[in-house]
Amino acid sequence: MVRGRFCPDRSEVVQQRCVVDRSENEDDFGSQLWYFDGWGVDNYDRRHAVYGVVEYSIQFGLNELIENAVFESDEERERFRQVYDQEKLKATWRHPFHGWLALGVVVMAVISLVYLAIVTLT
């Protein structure tokens, strides 16, 4: 609630639920994404509906807070979820641009070696 600039003493969380629970395994750390709904009270004693999200990383059995946010609407929170899901997709070397990147590195290495050879021979 503090992140949303609401008074933590007068605000309340009404409901919380885990929406993503990825277990830790041999290759990757785990993660959890929690949603919470509640009421935030601002400095002018006005109540606002709040929609929050908290992300934890699970590393060696311990939960570490990664990200938290408070949104004014459920739609904003769902947009955060879409970005969260896209970040969790694994990169693959089969993507066409990775081939172009590898080719560019090889070409630049060859150009650098040819340049160094010409400079040292003259």
Image (spheres, grey):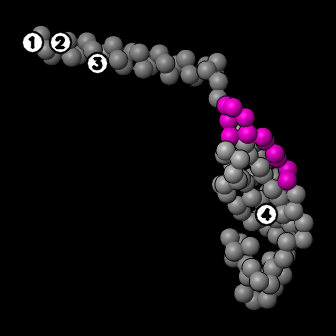
Which class describes the residues within 10 Å of circle 1: few (<14), some (14-19), or many (20+)?
A: few
The three-letter code of the residue at mark 3 reads Ser
CA gap, disc 2 and disc 4: 61 Å
Height in image: 81 above or below 113?
A: below
Disc 4 designates what residue?
Answer: 52
> Measured from the top left, where is residue 41 in percent x and y?
79, 82
Which class describes the residues within 10 Å of circle 4: few (<14), some (14-19), or many (20+)?
A: many
User: Is 47 one of the magenta-colored residues?
Assistant: no
* Helix, strand or loop status at disc 1: loop
> Measured from the top left, where is residue 43 in percent x and y?
72, 87
Q: What stretch is highlighted in magenta?
A: 18-29
34, 83: nearer the viewer: 34
CA gap, disc 3 and disc 4: 51 Å
CA gap, disc 1 and disc 2: 6 Å
Farthest-out residue, front? 61
Q: In this view, does 26 lie to the left or right of 37?
A: left
* Helix, strand or loop status at disc 4: strand
Between disc 2 and disc 4, the foreground one is: 4
21, 118: nearer the viewer: 21
Which mark is first along the chain, 4 or 1?
Answer: 4
Which mark is first along the chain, 4 or 3?
Answer: 4
Tag of residue 118: 2
Disc 3 designates what residue?
Answer: 112
CA gap, disc 3 and disc 1: 16 Å
- Please state, as top left, top right, bottom left or bottom right, where the C terminus lies in the image: top left
Q: Are marks 1 and 2 in contact (CB under 8 Å)?
A: yes
> Measured from the top left, where is residue 65 in percent x and y?
67, 57
Q: Do the residues labelled 2 and 4 touch (CB within 8 Å)?
A: no
Disc 1 designates what residue?
Answer: 122
The three-letter code of the residue at mark 2 reads Ile
The three-letter code of the residue at mark 1 reads Thr
The three-letter code of the residue at mark 4 reads Gly
